[in-house]
Amino acid sequence: MPVAAMPVIDVPTPSRTYRVTIADGALAAIARVLDEVRAPARRFVVSSPLVWRLHGPLLARALGGVEPILVPDGERFKQLATVTRIYDALVRANADRATTLITFGGGVIGDMAGFAAATYLRGIAVVHAPTTLLAQVDSAIGGKVGVNHPQGKNLIGAFHQPHAVVVDPVVLATLPRREFRAGIYEIIKYGMTSSAALFDRLGRDRTAIFARTPEVLTPIIAESCRIKADVVVKDERESGLRRILNFGHTAGHAIEAVTKYRRFRHGEAIGYGMLVAAQLARARGALAESDRKALADLIASLGPLPPIADLSATQMLEAMQHDKKVVAGKLHFVLPTAVGATTIVDDVVEKELRAALKQVGFAK
Ligand SMILES: NC(=O)c1ccc[n+]([C@@H]2O[C@H](COP(=O)([O-])OP(=O)(O)OC[C@H]3O[C@@H](n4cnc5c(N)ncnc54)[C@H](O)[C@@H]3O)[C@@H](O)[C@H]2O)c1
Ligand SMILES: [Zn+2]
C-alpha cells in the first residue's frame, strides 16, 4: 500500500502532535514516515534478540541498514539496569541530540527504550514500532514510558510523547497465541469503556480475529488506537478522563502483584479485573445484569484464564492498597454503567469489594 493511502490517526497532545500509521506492511514504509515527521537523522533501533531475529531483517531493509541495540525483554528485565545498557550503547556511539530512537518490540521494549529516550541528553526523539498486540493497541500510544522498581511496577517513569508510531499488524503473525490473546483483553476494555460497536465486533468476529485475518484484525487495531488516542488527547497526563482506561486495572494489578508477575500475562489479569469491576457495578445497581453477563461471556469465549481460587480476597485487598491508583488513601475504581460507558468512583468499601472478589472466584 502506498504511504499516502495508509490509514493514520493524528494525536494532537499538548506536548506534541504525532501520527499513528496503522496498515499491513506499514513497516516497509517507515523511512518515509520518519522523513515526514522530520525525525532527527541519526537512527538507532532498540529491540530484543527474539524480535530482531524474527523481524529485524524487514526493519533493517526498510531503514536502509541499521545496527540494533539488543536488550532482553521479559518483564523482569524492565528495570534501570537494562536502560543503562541502552545509555551505554548510545554513549559509545556518540549519539547526540540529532538522534531518533526507534523502539521495536513489545510493551517492555517500548517502555524501557522510551524511558531511555526521555532521559538521554534530557530527551531525544522516539518512534515506536510495536510488535505485540498489546503494544500496538495500548502502550505505544500515550507517551507513558518507564521501568519497574523491585517494590512495584512502573514506579519510575516519565511522559515522553513519540514523534510517530508505526503499527504493522503483519508482525503479529509470529506472536504466541497466549500473548495475542492477552492483547485482546485490552481491546475488550476499549469496547466496554468506550464503544459498544467495538465490543459487539469482538464477539461477532472472534474466529477471524484469532485467525489473525488482516481484513478483520487491522480495522479492530485501528479502532482501538483511535479510542486510546482520543482519550490521551483529552487528558495527556491522566488527571481525569484517561483514568477510564484503568478499567479492570485496580484488581488486575493486584492479581499480578500477589502472583509476583509470574502466573498471568498482564492482559489476563485485566480480564479478571474487568469481571471484578463489573460485579461491583452490578451489586450497586449501576450496571444491568445483561451487560455484566455480556462482558463475562465475551471474556469466557476467549478461553480459560489462569486459576485464582488459591488467591484470597484479603491478599487482593492488601495489594490494592499499594496501587498507584490509591489517591489520598482512596481506592479509585472504574465501574462500567453499560457496554460502552463507565463512571469513576472512590467510595468502594471493603465489604462490597470482598463480596465482588468472592463472586468472581477468589477465596475468602
Ligand atoms: N506505556 C503504557 O502506556 C503501557 C500500557 C500498557 C502496558 N504497558 C507495559 O507493557 C508491558 C507489556 O507489554 P507486552 O505485553 O507487549 O509484553 P512484552 O514486551 O514482554 O512482549 C511479550 C513477549 O512477546 C515477544 N514478542 C514481541 N513481539 C513479538 C512478535 N512479533 N512475535 C513473537 N514474539 C514477540 C517478546 O519477546 C516477549 O517475550 C508491561 O511492562 C506493561 O507495563 C505500558
Ligand atoms: Zn493494561
Image (cartoon, rainbow, N blue to C red):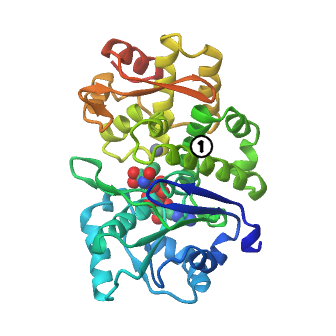
Give residue 305's position: percent from left, percent from top.
Answer: 51, 37
What is the total number of numbered labels drawn onto the structure image?
Answer: 1
Is residue 211 visible in this depiction of the protein?
Answer: no
Q: Nearer the viewer, residue 95 or 49?
A: 95
Q: 124 or 172: nearer the eye?
A: 124
Q: Is residue 178 left or right of residue 203?
A: left
Pick the quarter of the image with the N terminus.
bottom right
Mark 1 surroundings: few (<14), some (14-19) or many (≥20) residues within 10 A? many
Q: Quadrant of the C terminus?
A: top left
**Toward the viewer: 280 or 6?**
6
Q: Position of residue 101 (x, y in %)?
A: 43, 75
Q: Nearer the viewer, residue 85 or 347?
A: 347
Q: Is residue 97 above or below residue 108?
A: below
Q: Give percent across and percent down for residue 149.
A: 24, 53
Q: Say which residue appears at 49% left-offset and 11% top-offset.
A: 283
Task: Look at label 1 and name its amino acid.
Answer: Ile
